[in-house]
Image (cartoon, rainbow, N blue to C red):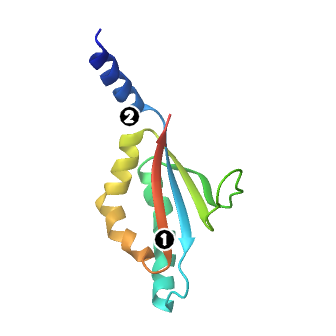
Amino acid sequence: MGNYAKTRIAINDWREMTALAIFEVSQIENPSIEQIKDYEIYRSLVPDLIKKHNGKYLIRGGNAQSLEGVMPAARWHVIEFENVDAVNKFWQSDEYQRIKGLRAGVVNVRAVIVSG
């Protein structure tokens, strides 16, 4: 088996491993009352949507302690999915895209997928 074939198998295996969606969520100063209300709607809808996509919260709103480097002032959400494709299906779903804007003006989010 050539190196290309081995690499392709490794990539396919990686996509099938359990994946974690990790969200760093930091507050924006001085959101409006309407923005806060919208964000509360977002927060109430997301858990059921995650469940619908077979995701499971491992950490929701957790605080972090820096072991090395600069620690951002943020809350953390860690969600387990079956694999990378499942995370992407959740993230790109029409349902999530419709509600994602409800967090605007209240929080900044950095989202990454970690698989392994």
Task: Indicate the amino acid at tag 1.
Answer: Asn
At 61% across and 64% down in the image, what residue appears?
A: 72
Q: Position of residue 13 (x, y in %)?
A: 39, 26
Residue 72: assigned label = none
- Looking at the rendering, which quadrant does residue 76 occupy? bottom right
Number of marks present in the image shown: 2
Task: Name the residue tied to disc 1.
Answer: 108
At 31% across and 15% down in the image, what residue appears?
A: 3
Secondary structure of the residue carrying numbered label 1: strand
Outermost residue on the top side: it is: 1
At 61% across and 66% down in the image, what residue appears?
A: 74
Give whichever of 56, 52 is nearer the camera.
56
Q: Position of residue 92 (x, y in %)?
A: 31, 56
Secondary structure of the residue carrying numbered label 2: helix
Give above or below for 89 relative to 82: below
Q: Is residue 73 left or right of residue 95?
A: right
Task: Name the residue tied to disc 2.
Answer: 15
Q: Circles 2 and 1: CB distance less than 8 Å?
A: no
Q: Position of residue 64 (x, y in %)?
A: 68, 58
